[in-house]
Every structure is written in C-alpha cells, then in structure tokens.
C-alpha cells in the first residue's frame, strides 16, 4: 500500500462498510453515524484519535469534517502506510476535506452498487429476465436479504432525503426536493435542460443547479458530457443525465411490476440507463478514467456512447429492441463516415452477436456480465 490512508466512497448502502470490515479485520471499527461517538470526535478530536494508535476504520467520516485536520498531523507524524480507512457516502464533503487536509496522503476509491458482472454469470438464467433486472437494480441489501425492491427502494429514498440531503445542504422544502428527484427520473437518458425543469418544479435555475450537484455528490446521478470533437458539425453541448441504478428510477416513476415496465413509454430510456451505468461501473471497478461521452448534432443525429481512447474513438449505439432492425445502423454509419472511423458497436436487448461487413459489431447486452469488457475498450 502506497498511501497513509484509504478513502472508500460511494452511495449509501453500496457495501462500503461490509467491504472494508472484511478486508481490514485487524483494525477497530468506528461508526461516526453513532451520535455519542460523533459527539466525542467533534468535541475532542485529539482525544478521539488517540484511542487508535494503530489506525482504525472511520465509517461515514463526512459526519465529522473537522476531524481531517487532526488526522493529517497524526498521519504525518507516524508515517505509516494504510493506517486509517475512511468511508463516506457523500463525495462533495469528503473530497473537499481530503483536498484541504489529506492531499497526497490518501488513496481515493469509489464503490458503486453491484454491476451485472458481480451479480450474474454470462450464462446465468437470471439474465433472461431483463425487466426484473431493471426493476431490481443493484443495491446490495436487495440481493443479500431478498428484500422486494418495491419495499426497500422507497425507504432508501426517504432515508437519503431526510438524512443526507439535510447534511449536504440546508434544503428547507424536502417535499419539493423529492418532487424534483421524481421528475428527474423521468429524464434519465435525456439531455439536461435546466430551464423547463425549474419551471416544472417551481424553483429558480440556481436552485436546480445546486440540487443537481447534491444528487451527483451523493452518487444518485451522473452527467454524461457531449464529446468535444464536432467534425465540422454544430453539436449539442448540454450533458445527458443518468441514474446509477435503474431500480431507483423505476421506483421513482411508480413502476413496481414487470407488466408495467414492458409497455412503459420510458422503457427504452431505462434500458439505456442500465447500459451506460454498467459501462461506468466497469471502468470504476477497474480503476479506469470515465472516458465515456455522447454525440448529437443539431439535426438530431446521435451516438449514445463515444468511448474516447485517446487516439481511437469507439461509437456505441444502445437499442432496447430484441430484434436487430435496419434503423439501428443509420446514425452509426453516418457518424463512422463523418469521423472516418472503421469500427462501431450496437448493443441491443437481444441475444445474438453479429459481425457485419460494414465494420459494425452487433452484441448482446448480456455480454456486460462477462469478465472482460465486451468492447475491448
């Protein structure tokens, strides 16, 4: 280990505590969610840290932001590697305090909800039930304890809003904030247009921007940026918004049964959310940079994903349909000609893989459950 401390961050209930306690069994575990322990750490940080001469696991450390300054002195004085393990469910607060106090002393890791590869084999029969996967999502408690997602997810949202949102920023009207989150779920996989969203929610644009930041920092959503190369075309410059978990999207939209999802007008967007979030999880789990973008010009031609490998751009179109259709190829062929790219991918909701003579590889969404990235990228 090359750092004096390790910070493991991710959304609430993503398995951070379970992971670090299983890996660092020799270290005492301290939950800063506990009111008495938190009060002790806040009132007497030096005395609190003195109880752990060989380091400890400090869980939900963003609850005690002032602790980091005192931790800095201890890490520098002892000069040991991997002494303290820090977890947090809020990226903004934890990163801010690490940047100020622990820069260069801490390894920074993200733990997101389960990816398909962690839950299923490529040939697993569970993968046959696509709509069930979309409804269930990847939060560990649902899978570990067989809790029905329609029971667990609403409580997760309620806990997140009542505890984390208040902690990140003083949001006075939680009912309006919850309505905002539900409206945002209906926009997963779409461009983020703040102005009409602000009108619909009934708040100003700056508030919407602030709330978007809250959801990003707590790993509920992420923004997919447009690719910067326009190939002499006027391109859209707004990011697209995605949720990390399709189960949460379905819950926010009031979708609780597979029959509802089968015919829901947003099913395609929810499927796209699954695919894009899986690509993000693969890169995060492998310690790679998130080199994913999208491309769209003013005429409406769009490529769902552009994987930027420095000297190689890999376009990917996402289609929820289970049968390959000629329309799947239109935008991809257009972009490949425009960019002089010879390789492209269509990832679709069916089962068969195809290699076309035009350089396009059609691949099943099930390949996301394979160990090696299906795009070789």
Image (cartoon, rainbow, N blue to C red):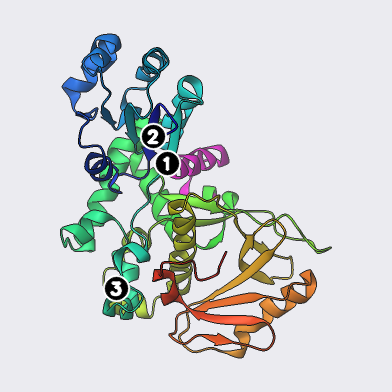
Q: Position of residue 3 (x, y in %)?
A: 43, 30
User: Between disc 1 and disc 2, whose residue precedes?
Assistant: 2
Q: Position of residue 323 (x, y in %)?
A: 49, 89
| Pointer 2 residue | 7
User: Magenta residues, as a range?
Assistant: 199-218
Q: CA distance from mark 2 to mark 3?
A: 33 Å
Residue at the image point whose x is 72% and y is 76% from the top:
342
* Mark identifier at residue 109: 1
Residue furthest right in the image = 232
Residue at the image point whose x is 27% and y is 16% from the top:
49
| Pointer 3 residue | 132
Mark 2 vs mark 3: in front: 2
Q: Left of 350 or right of it: where is 157?
A: left
Q: Position of residue 64 (x, y in %)?
A: 32, 22
| Residues packed near mark 3 inside 10 Å, few (<14), some (14 to 19) or many (20 plus) | some
**Quarter of the figure with the N terminus:** top left
| Residues packed near mark 1 inside 10 Å, few (<14), some (14 to 19) or many (20 plus) | some
Give 357 or 100, whichever is nearer the viewer.
Answer: 357
């Amino acid at each position: 280990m090359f750092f004096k401390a390790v910070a493991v961050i991710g959304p609430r209930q993503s398995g951070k505590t379970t992971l670090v306690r299983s890996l660092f069994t020799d270290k005492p575990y301290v939950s800063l969610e506990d009111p008495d322990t938190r009060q002790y750490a806040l009132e007497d940080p030096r005395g609190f840290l003195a109880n752990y001469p060989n380091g400890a696991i400090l869980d939900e450390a963003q609850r005690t932001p002032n602790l980091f300054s005192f931790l800095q002195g201890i890490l520098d004085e002892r000069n040991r590697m991997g002494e303290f393990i820090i977890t947090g469910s809020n990226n903004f607060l934890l990163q801010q305090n690490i940047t100020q106090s622990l820069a260069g002393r801490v390894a920074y890791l993200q733990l997101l909800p389960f990816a398909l590869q962690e839950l299923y084999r490529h040939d697993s029969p569970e993968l046959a039930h696509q709509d069930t996967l979309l409804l269930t999502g990847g939060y560990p408690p649902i899978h570990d304890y067989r809790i029905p997602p329609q029971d667990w997810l609403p409580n997760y949202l309620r806990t997140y809003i009542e505890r984390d949102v208040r902690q990140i920023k003083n949001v006075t009207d939680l009912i309006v904030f919850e309505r905002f989150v539900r409206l945002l779920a209906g926009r997963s996989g779409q461009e983020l247009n703040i102005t009409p969203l602000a009108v619909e929610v009934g708040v100003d644009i700056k508030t919407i921007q602030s709330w978007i930041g809250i959801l990003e920092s707590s790993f509920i959503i992420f923004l997919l940026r447009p690719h910067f190369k326009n190939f002499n075309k006027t391109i859209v410059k707004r990011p697209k918004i995605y949720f990390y978990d399709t189960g949460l999207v379905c819950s926010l939209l009031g979708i609780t049964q597979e029959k509802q999802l089968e015919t829901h007008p947003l099913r395609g967007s929810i499927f796209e959310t699954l695919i894009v979030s899986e690509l993000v999880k693969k890169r995060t789990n492998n310690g790679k940079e998130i080199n994913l973008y999208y491309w769209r010009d003013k005429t409406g031609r769009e490529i769902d994903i552009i994987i930027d490998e420095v000297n190689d751009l890999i376009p990917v179109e996402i289609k929820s349909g289970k049968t390959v259709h000629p329309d799947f190829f239109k935008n991809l062929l257009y972009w490949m000609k425009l960019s002089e790219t010879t390789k492209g991918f269509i990832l679709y909701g069916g089962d068969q893989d195809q290699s076309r003579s035009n350089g396009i590889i059609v691949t099943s969404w099930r390949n996301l459950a394979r160990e090696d990235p299906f795009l070789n990228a």
